[in-house]
Amino acid sequence: VQLQASGGGSVQAGGSLTLSCAGYTSDPERTFDYWNVGWFRQAPGKEHDFVSAISYSGKNTYYPDSVKGRFTISRDNDKHTVSLRMNNLKPEDTAVYYCGAALALFGSKWYNRSEYDYWGQGTLVTVSS
């Protein structure tokens, strides 16, 4: 599956952005709705952090405490898209955001970047105070 992330930009603290991750696959047996999707971010000079994830059906979602209540992940399998709505953004949310896809995730694997098989290019989010 090929992923394309978009929607980054510059906002002031308290503002909102919506990131999108579009998935493309030519495999008729593993269409986009087979894939679990996660978002990770990397701030300058720091490691990648887990941001959110959603199961292939959209039934299950995952968030770390740092974004819970502010970010909402959703998906539209008909449009092959996963969205990440980010509200009340803070300067510490500044990072490059990446979306990844994986077929089999359970337990702590959702939060582990190495468990994802494919990645899109990053999209930069800058939050100013």
Image (cartoon, helix red, strand yellow):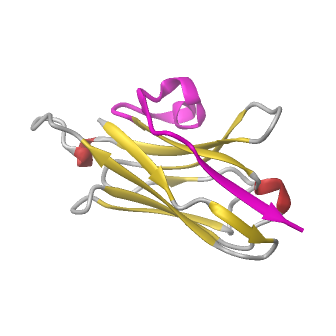
The foreground one among 121 and 72 is: 121
Identify the residue at the far front of this view.
10
Quick check: 90 left or right of 121? right
Q: Is residue 103 visible?
A: yes
Quick check: 27 left or right of 55? left
| Magenta region includes residue 118 | yes
Which residues lie in the magenta part?
A: 102-129
Total marks shown come to: 0
**Which x, y percent locates residue 36?**
38, 42
Name the residue rendered at 62%, 53% in the picture: 63
Name the residue rendered at 84%, 60% in the picture: 91
In the rendered image, the vertical position of residue 104 relative to residue 8, given as above or below? above
The foreground one among 2 and 36 is: 2
Q: Is residue 58 visible?
A: no
**Which x, y percent locates residue 111?**
59, 36
| Magenta region includes residue 98 | no
Identify the residue at the far left of this view.
28
Name the residue rendered at 84%, 65% in the picture: 128
